[in-house]
Amino acid sequence: MSPLFLFLSFVALLSALGVVLAKNPVHSVLFLILTFFTLSGHYLLLNAQFLAAVNIIVYAGAIMVLFLFVIMFLNLNEETEPHKPALAKFAAAIAGGSLLLILVAAMRNVSPAGYDPASFDSQIGMVDRLGLVLFQQYALPFELASVLLLAAMVGSVMLGKRETGERNF
């Protein structure tokens, strides 16, 4: 394993823990952005440049702006948050521990495939290969998804359009 992989994994695990353990929701979102950047670094190590770029643009950019907007809009603070009883915290710890136990049991007999230089293709994650597959084999689903997104945009414009004489408060 390369030192860069180990460093990115270490930072990803620490920032994921920061997402869960941060008391301030804004700090939690910032830790999540750091987690997305480290995952994009892993994608780059796997030679998936397009996936890394989409991860940064879509998740670390647009989705995080939406999360921050909702957090700021809700104005979350400790005074308005209801007190959680000790039984709920205990039940959450039991549920998390049982999930960890199930994951360890499921992954116990997994043997990862080794690297085979004879069958290695360095062009797997490249954008041009993705474009060829997308526009040749999956042209119809791609076009159907674009029509669906167009209908959603037209619907949102129609819902947001004001009628004559209507006032916003």
Image (tube, helix red, strand yellow):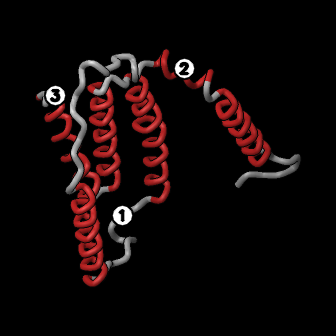
Q: Is residue 22 visible?
A: no
Q: Which residue is mark 2?
A: 131
Residue 9, image x and y in percent?
19, 39
- Residue 99, numbered circle: none
Helix, strand or loop at label 3? It is helix
- Residue 4, numbered circle: 3
Please report the residue visible at 29 percent of the width from the left and 79 percent of the height from the top.
91
Type of residue at label 3?
Leu
Q: Is residue 80 left or right of residue 9?
A: right
Q: Nearer the viewer, residue 163 or 134?
A: 134
- Residue 77, numbered circle: 1
Q: Toward which corner of the image does residue 31 lie, by quadrant?
A: top left
Type of residue at label 2?
Gly
Q: Kindly report the distance in space between the C-alpha atoms of the residues bearing marks 3 and 1.
A: 38 Å
Q: Toward which corner of the image does residue 118 lie, by quadrant?
A: top left
Please report the residue visible at 37 percent of the width from the left and 71 percent of the height from the top.
81
Type of residue at label 1?
Asn
Residue 154, image x and y in percent?
76, 39
Q: Kindly report the distance in space between the C-alpha atoms of the residues bearing marks 2 and 3.
A: 29 Å
Helix, strand or loop at label 1? It is loop
Relative to 102, does residue 33 appear above or below in the rendering?
Answer: above
Relative to 149, does residue 129 appear above or below in the rendering?
Answer: above
Q: Is residue 51 visible?
A: yes
